[in-house]
Amino acid sequence: MRKPLVMGNWKLNGSIDMAKNLVAGLRKELSNDTACNIAIAPPVVYLDSVKHQLDGTNIILGAQDVGIHLSGAYTGEVSVEMLKDIGVTHIIIGHSERRTYHKESDEFIAKKFGVIKEAGLVPVLCIGETEAENEAGQTQAVCARQIDAVIKALGVQAFNGAVIAYEPVWAIGTGKSATPAQAQAVHKFIRDHIAKQDAKVAQQVIIQYGGSVNDKNAAELFTQPDIDGALVGGASLKADAFAAIVKAAELAKK
Ligand SMILES: O=C[C@H](O)COP(=O)(O)O
């Protein structure tokens, strides 16, 4: 039985005060004994203070990205060891916003996956098709290509203990979530695709859905057998909405 992961990606939002209020809200709304894993990924500058604010909770600290180098003359970069040093365990990579605005390739993202695994942390690999790709019937081909880049570089075993977030780009921040049936079909495709190489790895890999998940649509998404939680953007900025999504995941997977 897979334990779902509900992860909040704050993206480029927040301030010291906002982080304090949001974490205080989460502490109030969520018990320490949840039947699903919960993570939040604040902007990198707030990670250390948020880590302290999370003391005594079971909320996991996540990061939104990582560099591929461990140290050296790479101005502006943050290494996996630095993130590990301050208590980060889960790292989002390959988000469509990084793929689009920073031109990150499948191969480059696979390198990030490798450094995260090497450090003993958990990669949260975002994959998903654009609207044009969706309309051209390329959803499966795009997801397969993005996963295969990791398999080619690191082998299928790299997905042991890893997380995949299926995020159709057309659903991100648009209020237009995939329907539970649409999402389930892609999640099943992803799991089957990995199973072709290793059934055990496919059975344990967490596949989250992301794209306009909110407190209203979460419950139905989570009833789908291959949807193991969510990567939440906008709704993770409100403690009550995020907590409601966590509770929906717990209920659905009981
Ligand atoms: O990382 C989160 C996703 O991009 C989803 O964002 P959203 O919930 O605001 O649509």
Image: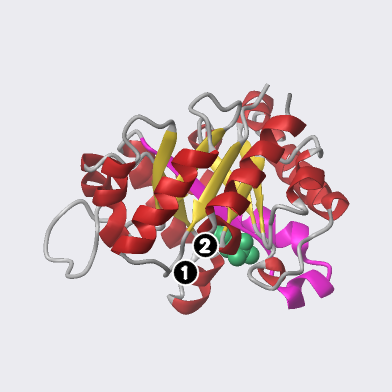
Magenta span: 121-146
Q: Quadrant of residue 178?
A: bottom right
Q: Residue at x 29, y 62 (%)?
A: 16
Query: Residue placed farthest to the left in the image?
Result: 73
Q: Is mark 2 within 8 Å of ligand 1?
A: yes
Q: Picture coordinates of residue 43 (x, y %)? A: 36, 61
Asked if the residue under mark 1 is in contact with the one under mark 2, i.e. CB atoms within 8 Å, the reply is yes
Amino acid marked by disc 2:
His
- Viewer-nearest residue: 95 or 133: 95
Q: Quadrant of residue 167?
A: bottom right
Which image quarter is the N terminus in? Answer: top right
Query: On the rendered structure, is 56 left or right of 4?
Result: left
Q: Which residue is mark 2?
A: 95
Q: Residue at x 55, y 67 (%)?
A: 96
Q: Picture coordinates of residue 22 (x, y %)? A: 44, 54
Residue 126 is one of the magenta-drawn residues: yes
Q: Which residue is mark 1?
A: 98
- Viewer-nearest residue: 31 or 187: 31
